[in-house]
Amino acid sequence: MIGITLPDGSVKQVESGTTPMDIARSISEGLARNVISASFNNHKVEATTPLTSDGSLVLHTWNDDEGKQAFWHSTAHIMAQALEELYPGIKLTIGPAIDNGFYYDVDLGSHTISDKDLPAIENKMIEIARGKHEFKMREVSKSEALEFYKNQDNQYKVELIENLEDGSITFCDHDTFTDLCRGGHIPNTGIVKAVKLMSIAGAYWRGDENNTQLTRIYGISFPKQKDLTEYLNLLEEAKKRDHRKLGKELELFTFSNRVGQGLPLWLPKGAALRERLENFLKKAQKKAGYEMVATPHIGQKELYVTSGHYAKYGEDSFQPIKTPKADEEFLLKPMNCPHHCEIFNSKPWSYKDLPKRYAEFGTVYRYEQSGELHGLTRVRGFTQDDAHIYCTPEQLDQEFKDVIDLVLYVFGSLGFENFSTQVSIRDLSKPEKYIGDVRTWELAEKAIISAAEDKNLDYVVVEGEAAFYGPKLDFMVKDALGRSWQLGTIQVDYNLPERFDLQYKGSDNEMHRPVMIHRAPFGSMERFIAILLEHTGGNFPLWLMPEQVSILSLSEKYEKYAEKVLNLLENDEIRALVDNRNETIGKKIREAELTKVPYMLIVGEQEEKDGTVSVRKHSEGDIGTMTVSEFSDMIHAEIQKESVEFKV
Amino acid sequence: MIGITLPDGSVKQVESGTTPMDIARSISEGLARNVISASFNNHKVEATTPLTSDGSLVLHTWNDDEGKQAFWHSTAHIMAQALEELYPGIKLTIGPAIDNGFYYDVDLGSHTISDKDLPAIENKMIEIARGKHEFKMREVSKSEALEFYKNQDNQYKVELIENLEDGSITFCDHDTFTDLCRGGHIPNTGIVKAVKLMSIAGAYWRGDENNTQLTRIYGISFPKQKDLTEYLNLLEEAKKRDHRKLGKELELFTFSNRVGQGLPLWLPKGAALRERLENFLKKAQKKAGYEMVATPHIGQKELYVTSGHYAKYGEDSFQPIKTPKADEEFLLKPMNCPHHCEIFNSKPWSYKDLPKRYAEFGTVYRYEQSGELHGLTRVRGFTQDDAHIYCTPEQLDQEFKDVIDLVLYVFGSLGFENFSTQVSIRDLSKPEKYIGDVRTWELAEKAIISAAEDKNLDYVVVEGEAAFYGPKLDFMVKDALGRSWQLGTIQVDYNLPERFDLQYKGSDNEMHRPVMIHRAPFGSMERFIAILLEHTGGNFPLWLMPEQVSILSLSEKYEKYAEKVLNLLENDEIRALVDNRNETIGKKIREAELTKVPYMLIVGEQEEKDGTVSVRKHSEGDIGTMTVSEFSDMIHAEIQKESVEFKV
């Protein structure tokens, strides 16, 4: 008999040789139907692997990441079989699961495969899947394994096996197909109900451009046809919402090869959007007792020697800026905290003055490889909605809670209702990794967890994920397409106060070290705007829209009246423009719809006579005729409704 | 007979040997009394120099710069004589006039001079001055000159003479004193009525630290005692208004040696002040049809190769930022225009879209030697209130006028009533120095001059002062102490549109080159705030004040009421703070006066009972008791009065 510990802590005594599937079945038939893979003592096993020792077991279904990985990895085997059958003589190399699906790299020899061949491969795969062939692992000796692939003249697998240790080598069989494989499969091919091969790309063997170029085929699979349809719709929708595409269409930002990759240039509408977001946060921050400061984008070497960043400045970074003075060096700032510490240090403080909360929309620069740059989400210069709070250890608890309130206010105001958080704490077994004494860490970790509890956050605590300088709380939001994005962060820091020798005079008249909190609700303005674009598809809340109203004249005759309406709206601080072109009203409406302007006002003879406007709402259509001032009131009421004030 | 042309163009026929003073006398006795120096054919001469050829003559009085220079240079001779008499055996080196006074560098040998010796030297100088000794120039041969100074064992003058050409060497005598001198003196020592020696400093011979260290004595002199008194008062006042001192006292900005010299850190009150100024200009710019953009603080080498700045990047600049990629280089941006040109280039334009007016508070970096840094007026990183207008050549005239209106609005709103302007145009004799064709230059110069006329500006046209890329208009303001500061600039640019190949489609359907205007009314935010501090002594207009109101409680008993008043004011968007310290009201008032807060509200028992406040105005005292809402109305009325809206 062996003891199997389940995630809820319960222990099942079962006979040696019992499989994870057996255990699932012993719990419930429903569970057994859904189990597709398992982990035993933190190692991937098959649902059908006999367990022969005590250990902890986690059962995986399609709904968790490990389940999906097994599902997609198994589908890669099915694709490999299909390819071998359709293209005899090809050589397989590796075929892993990835974040969304799987791929297999194959040496096609004299064959070629193009996009138009993919449906036939998909069909073959489905045919194989329907056979409900079991995936069966078996151990093979190194010599056996080598012989198998030498017979196939497959130098790739031979090379892989040569690097493996005898006794640790396994093959996986299903149907007529065999592959070198470490394991982690679903019980049988029949579970795979829907397959889509996404694309074909070139890939060098082992990623080295001196090696043979292989053909990589990307695919994804699902346990239900409906899941595939949804996924493809999501992809289609994501393509439409790609912030790079929307940013261009809405004229928010641009890039220039001369200025440099990864350095966005904000066009007028984008700069105004960004400013509205900044003003929104500034207003809330003011209420929350923050003070804005402003610092340069560079700092002298000495600053970063003090902060400790200089030592971490490597060859993969923007290099230091030299000056005519020997030994003088400046760095593009990688973060704003050292500058803020110097501001804190510019005068003496008493405990009565704390907390000090310095906020800045501070631009930082980090060198990214050009291949890793992506629109506004991976850039080389970005602006953090940064702030640093300097407080007494006793104030940490309350300050942390207040910061959470602010972050939640920001997310709520911008329509991110769906988010989770992670509390990153020390690895207790490695105290040497962390700066600061144990008691302050304990206090800080407790403060964060109690704050997360207090604020009813959906949180997980992850040990060992804290920075060396302090524990932190990270926010991940889900956008409208269900994609997760890391946004804001709140971090406790014991390191910089030490390195910058920050002090305040306590009520005991002694000098003390303040605690520092780093926080950024948006994270980076660039990244946040990218996510907001993809989340809303460019249909921002009304208060944020670059243009709120487009006035469409029925013909050039009504230009004067259109301008009058524009003037009235502008006096009411409504952002509007006039389309007076000599085009049909139908064309004007269609084009206005594309710009996502929330309201269109149509003006013609009747409207001019009555002093009214005919109102159309974006993607909804006509909502009636009203006076300009009624329309203005309606707009302001809508904005009012959206704009909840931050309360402290 | 020779012909002497006077500045008004008239020509006087006089006998050869006539002196400038004779000519002055022939014009009027009053003029003759005031003439102290002259320029003949653009060379300095004495008022007593006989003129022996045709030429143009300018007579100088104390009221022009050249007159002052002669006055101060002559006083340096008097000081040298006084020093030789008081400290026998010292060796003179050089003694020029400077912007405010003069200095003389002397090798004191075994003597020493300290501040307490200065009055005795001043007395001796006045004694010499009263002798009304004439300054008389005479030519000497090189050998004669060398012998004179070798006899005095003065290696410095010997070294100077050795570098001069025989035949060009002159001495100046007055009383018993003789000095090597090129000329440019007042007629006699008696005109110097007041002398003040300001300070003593060390200075290396020829500015080279490997040479002997000399003693430099700084002084200034005036034709009237009253002028000296006024000057010393002005210095005293200027010291009080020194923006570095006020910036510290008012907690506006600070510097950190770690961050780096010349890189200001804006403290909360300073950052808020700056933001108010920015918002003020943004509002006016919006009305004037500008659009804000935002660009990074760095740009790739290619950008500056295109703009032409890269070629001018020398060893005295911030050096390029290298990256892991070979040949890739970024520069801290020295100006914003190349980025804005790339924004203009991001889409095609029609003549109907122009003018485009891109504005940005854009930070630029320029390396200055550490010795040249000075508070906020000479820094290494500063933010320009920059904008670039892209227009058709036909629009240039109107655009230029509109920019002048904006600049005048800015100056007027901030209390700079006293300013002059300079129109810088081509040197017509050197057409090769300038880019762009002659016709466009003519148009642009005409446009600027006609705009200056039209706007009734006090302007001078200076030939040859235009940049190679276009003519410009610069604004110089006079502050409350009468000091001149260069502020805003408006420049026409034909160069960058060419280099960036900027284009628009004209009404003729052909592609055309737009004209570009650079403009910055403040010039730099840092410099402007420095000047505003020195101009106002920190007593900014009410709308700009960091704190508008200080609420002083009569005792801690009234803390609650004080907080209530604070709340009411904050709800009315008035910036206020409470002084609840356990101090006497007298001390609180005195301290509030020092912070320059415009209004103090005293609250005690009676005020709490009546719901009122007792109002004191900064530097004026008690102005009566009123309700909080009456006070709030008063403040808003005052701000309203100050804040004239920009009208287009």
Image (cartoon, coloured by chain):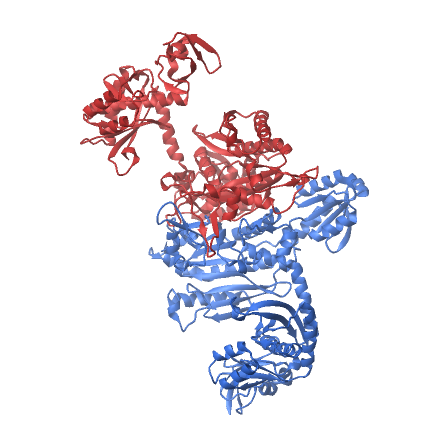
Chain colours: A blue, B red
> In the rendered image, is residue B632 in sight?
no
Q: Residue furthest front?
A: A110
Q: Nearer the viewer, residue A493 or A619?
A: A619
Left or right of residue B492, residue A113 in this image: right
Please give the name of the residue rendered at 55% of the width and 88% of the height, measured from the top-left corner.
Answer: A50
Q: Position of residue B522 (x, y in %)?
A: 51, 37
| Vertical side of A133 occupied by B436: above or below | above
Q: Quadrant of residue B339?
A: top right
Residue B454, by quadrant, is top right
Residue A556's spot in the image, x, y percent? 77, 40
- Residue B243 in the figure: left or right of residue B272: left
Q: Position of residue A590 (x, y in %)?
A: 75, 52
Residue B287 vertical placement versus A465 (above, below): above
| For residue B335, above or below residue A594 | above
Residue furthest toward the right?
A606
A183 shown above or below B283: below
Q: Between residues B455 and B307, which one lies in front from this camera angle?
A: B307
Q: Nearer the viewer, residue B56 or B634?
A: B56
Asked whether B413 or B434 is in front, the reply is B434
The count of marks equals 0
Q: Residue at x 35, y 48 (%)?
A: A326
Q: Is residue B504 visible to us here?
A: yes
Judge from the rendering whether residue B573 lies leftward or rightward of residue A496; answer left or right.
right
Point out residue A194 in the picture as x, y percentages from the top left corner.
Answer: 68, 75
